[in-house]
Image (tube, grey):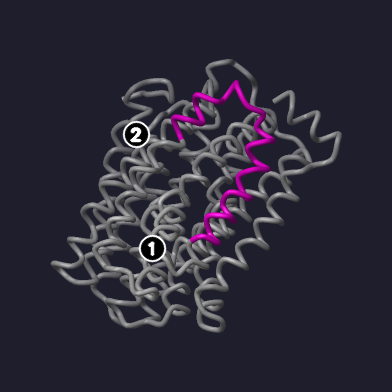
């Protein structure tokens, strides 16, 4: 079946592919928590495995993004998710750290290959900002289902069930991609996708997104562990994670509504500041309410801000290379986050995470404040 990014089947496939490829954004707290609580790893080791998945994702995205226009999108997406399903399924059957590490890398390589062509396809649509908001909303719904179901499955069947759940998600995405992934990535506006030197604003925006992704992964990976370390009730912490999923339904539709109403650069500058404030709420307070508020809206800030960043990058780079490299932008920061966070926790405790996040957020703000010449480019995008 021939589909495009403007058809219902094509959009549905892109929504599923985005959810599967971005599973780390939803699952990281449970992922790291299961590795620590279920497999007996220390925070640094658990963060290291998540980092290896993300390192594989970065490598795949950097390789695939420049070639995405020449790859068979449907076969690449379906094949990538299928291999990721096999790798995650195998993790559930091994115990050795080395074997788990290799399989995490393989899963990251495969999933990000599929995700890169997904984002390149979204970037080639008629309205990349709006379509990215749509798939972002789908990710919010997916987060609710994941947090509401997978922890219960893990509690009933044991730690390996987490990786079997990941395998099922990837297998489903592979089937959907094989049936309905868009076969045409040409923009409906007819704008030619011309490759050339990337503008300085693109590199700055990409670096800023990576900094935000680093903060996101560094803090979000330990949300559940912070609650446990503070002695908060386990059910209450689980409730926060479920509420977080509902909060994640808001930013994508809001970003779509505000597309023509706010300056993208203003959103990009404010996003890291809000992200740092929420990180400090979670890590510095010993009370449950500030922790809960920070945790509930933490991922939503990244989703909202990145929707504007995605639309901006699609406008600045018609070739699609920048948006095709979205997984690399997100995951090059996210790859460092879990192991950096685990190392900070091991050396200085959970409170130090918030201070580190504030410093990195300041770097993101600096990246999103380009020179006057680049501001002119941004304001006309």
Q: Could you say which disc has been placed on residue 288 in the image?
A: 1
Return the residue at label 2.
13
In the displayed structure, 26 sits above or below 141; it is below
Q: Is residue 193 left or right of residue 196?
A: left
Badge 2 or badge 1: first in the primary sequence: 2
Quadrant location of the C terminus? top right
Front-lying residue, 32 or 344? 344
Q: What residue is shown at x 56% (from left), y 45% (from top)?
A: 326
Judging from the image, what secondary structure is the residue with disc 1 in?
Answer: helix
Dividing the picture into quadrants, the one containing residue 263 is top right
Q: What residue is shown at x 42% (from left), y 65% (from top)?
A: 287
The stretch of residues the image draws in magenta is 252-281
Going by the picture, which residue comes out furthest to the top? 189
Q: Is residue 148 left or right of residue 270?
A: left
Relative image position of residue 246 (x, y in whole percent):
33, 43
Q: What residue is shown at x 79% (from left), y 42% (from top)?
A: 370
Judging from the image, what secondary structure is the residue with disc 2 in?
Answer: helix
Say whether residue 360 is magenta: no
Q: Is residue 338 visible?
A: yes
Quadrant location of the N terminus? top left
Dividing the picture into quadrants, the one containing residue 239 is bottom left
Relative image position of residue 197 (x, y in whole percent):
77, 39
Going by the picture, which residue comes out furthest to the left? 156
Task: Name the front one of labels 2 and 1.
Answer: 1
In the displayed structure, 299 sits above or below 94; it is above
Relative image position of residue 313 (x, y in whole percent):
64, 36
**Magenta-drawn stretch, dominant element (helix, strand or loop):** helix
Marks 2/1: CA–CA distance? 39 Å
Q: Residues within 10 Å of mark 2 (few under 14, many from 20)?
A: many
Q: What residue is shown at x 57% (from left), y 41% (from top)?
A: 305
In the displayed structure, 146 sits above or below 280; it is above
Dividing the picture into quadrants, the one containing residue 193 is top right
């Amino acid at each position: 079946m021939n589909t495009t990014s403007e058809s219902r089947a094509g959009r549905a496939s892109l929504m599923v592919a985005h959810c599967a490829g971005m599973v780390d954004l939803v699952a990281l707290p449970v992922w790291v928590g299961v590795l620590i609580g279920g497999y007996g790893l220390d925070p640094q080791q658990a963060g290291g495995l998540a980092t290896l998945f993300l390192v594989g994702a970065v490598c795949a995205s950097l390789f695939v993004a420049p070639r995405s226009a020449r790859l068979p999108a449907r076969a690449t997406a379906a094949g990538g998710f299928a291999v990721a399903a096999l790798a995650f399924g195998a993790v559930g059957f091994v115990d050795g750290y080395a074997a788990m590490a290799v399989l995490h890398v393989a899963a990251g390589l495969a999933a990000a290959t599929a995700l890169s062509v997904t984002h390149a396809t979204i970037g080639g649509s008629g309205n990349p900002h709006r379509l990215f908001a749509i798939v972002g909303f789908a990710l919010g719904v997916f987060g609710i289902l994941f947090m509401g179901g997978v922890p219960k499955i893990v509690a009933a069947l044991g730690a390996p069930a987490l990786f079997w759940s990941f395998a099922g998600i990837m297998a489903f995405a592979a089937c959907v991609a094989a049936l309905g992934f868009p076969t045409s990535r040409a923009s409906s506006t007819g704008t030619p996708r011309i490759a050339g030197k990337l503008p300085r604003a693109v590199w700055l925006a990409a670096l800023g997104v990576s900094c935000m992704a680093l903060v996101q992964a560094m803090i979000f990976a330990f949300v559940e562990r912070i609650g446990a370390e503070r002695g908060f009730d386990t059910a209450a912490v689980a409730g926060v994670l479920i509420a977080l999923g509902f909060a994640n339904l808001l930013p994508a539709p809001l970003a779509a509504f505000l597309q023509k109403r706010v300056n993208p650069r203003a959103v990009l500058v404010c996003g890291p500041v809000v992200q740092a404030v929420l990180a400090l709420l979670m890590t510095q307070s010993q009370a449950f309410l500030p922790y809960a508020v920070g945790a509930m809206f933490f991922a939503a800030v990244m989703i909202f801000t990145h929707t504007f960043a995605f639309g901006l990058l699609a406008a600045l780079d018609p070739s699609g290379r920048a948006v095709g490299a979205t997984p690399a932008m997100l995951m090059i920061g996210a790859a460092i986050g879990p192991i950096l966070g685990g190392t900070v926790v091991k050396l200085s405790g959970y409170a130090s995470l918030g201070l580190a996040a504030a410093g990195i957020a300041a770097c993101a703000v600096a990246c999103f404040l380009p020179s006057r010449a680049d501001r002119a480019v941004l304001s006309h995008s």
